[in-house]
């Protein structure tokens, strides 16, 4: 529902124009906690003086608030305000932030050059040092290198004169939220598609492979979950060749397997939990996975 703006609200916009700038007017419009500006049409008029919303500079009327108005002024200021609102929304938790359960966030990247990251292996058991004896050099673990480069994502959006004239407040105010949601979803899909598509990684093999001892073919069940757990625990640390011992913590499934996954960790008629039931993994439904044969366990 939409309630037409009152004269009192128009006065509120004028009050801001006397004490602020175009960016403050638009920031107030997109701030859900700031109710000073509720009409986009009035905000447009306060900034441009274009009372009839023609989009032509020759129709601009003198207004209390004056700035140097050019053909790109409103677009630039509006874009900045939408960007600020979008970033605010982006940093709030939403349903697409679930990728953080299985991925580490690295250091900020400031350019588009190729980045190299290294993973070092482990040391074997430390040898005994005899009384008054020497400490001998240890075998330095091998290291692995992975390379990547960041890319830009984005686009442009248009707010039409019709939207301004019609004062489509709800529609315009939802733009930053929807843009932030799209940005969150884009990043989340990048992470989850990395698992779903099984690409070649830094060692020249695909992520899930027999060589990595992390690939199975059985449908999701108590038995296959036990096999996956044993394979994860048995993963050897490069360099030391000792089992790392990490246990599964998260189970990623498509919607088709969510009920099966949930029931795995629930007691049936048995009074005591089974071995698999006691694992109680964090079940994450990946919203756009559609293959019912795909499921992934992560530490």
Image: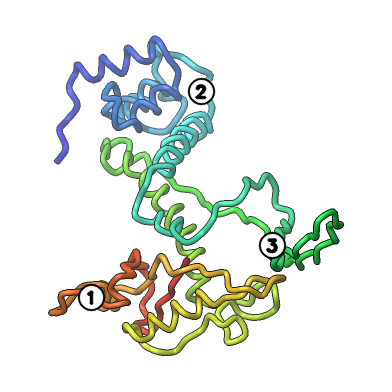
Q: Earlier in the sequence, mark 1 or mark 2?
A: 2
The residue mark sitting in front, 3 or 2, is: 3
Alpha-carbon span between mark 1 and mark 2: 63 Å
Alpha-carbon span between mark 3 and mark 1: 37 Å
Please tell me which residue is depicted at 50% across the width and 72% down the height of the picture.
195
Tell me: 149 left or right of 131: left
Q: Earlier in the sequence, mark 3 or mark 1?
A: 3
Residue, disc 2: 69
Please tell me which residue is depicted at 41% across the width and 48% down the height of the picture.
179
> Where is residue 52 drawn, in percent x and y?
32, 28
5 shown above or below 156: above
Tell me: 179 left or right of 35: right
Residue, disc 1: 263
Q: Is residue 88 visible?
A: yes
Please tell me which residue is depicted at 51% across the width and 23% down the height of the picture.
69
Badge 3 crowding class, 10 Å Cα cut-off, few under 14, some 14 to 19, many 20 or more, is few
> Where is residue 87 drawn, in percent x and y?
46, 40
Tell me: 215 left or right of 279: right
Residue, disc 3: 119
Quadrant where the N terminus sits is top left
Q: Earlier in the sequence, mark 3 or mark 2?
A: 2
Badge 2 crowding class, 10 Å Cα cut-off, few under 14, some 14 to 19, many 20 or more, is few
């Amino acid at each position: 529902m939409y309630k037409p703006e009152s004269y009192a609200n128009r006065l509120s916009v004028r009050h801001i124009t006397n004490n602020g700038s175009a960016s403050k007017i638009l920031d107030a419009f997109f701030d859900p906690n700031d109710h000073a500006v509720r009409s986009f049409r009035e905000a447009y008029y306060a900034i441009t003086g274009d009372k009839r919303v023609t989009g032509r500079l020759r129709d601009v009327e003198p207004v209390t608030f004056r700035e140097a108005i050019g053909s790109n002024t409103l677009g630039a200021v509006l874009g900045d305000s939408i960007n600020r609102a979008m970033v605010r929304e982006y940093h709030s938790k939403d349903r697409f932030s679930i990728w953080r359960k299985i991925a580490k966030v690295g250091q900020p990247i400031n350019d588009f050059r190729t980045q190299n990251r290294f993973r070092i292996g482990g040391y074997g058991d430390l040898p005994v040092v005899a009384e008054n004896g020497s400490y001998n050099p240890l075998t330095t673990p091998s290291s692995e290198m992975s390379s990547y480069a960041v890319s830009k994502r984005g686009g442009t959006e248009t707010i039409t004169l019709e939207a301004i004239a019609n004062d489509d407040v709800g529609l315009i105010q939802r733009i930053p939220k929807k843009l932030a949601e799209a940005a969150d979803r884009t990043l989340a899909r990048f992470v989850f598609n990395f698992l779903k598509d099984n690409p070649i990684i830094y060692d020249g093999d695909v992520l899930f492979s027999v060589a990595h001892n992390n690939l199975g073919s059985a449908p999701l069940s108590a038995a296959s979950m036990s096999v996956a757990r044993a394979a994860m625990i048995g993963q050897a640390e490069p360099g030391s060749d000792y089992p790392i011992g990490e246990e599964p913590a998260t189970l990623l499934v498509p919607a088709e397997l969510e009920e099966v996954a949930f029931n795995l960790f629930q007691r049936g008629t048995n009074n005591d939990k089974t071995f698999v039931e006691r694992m109680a993994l964090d079940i994450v439904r990946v919203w756009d996975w559609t293959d019912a044969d795909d499921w992934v366990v992560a530490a």
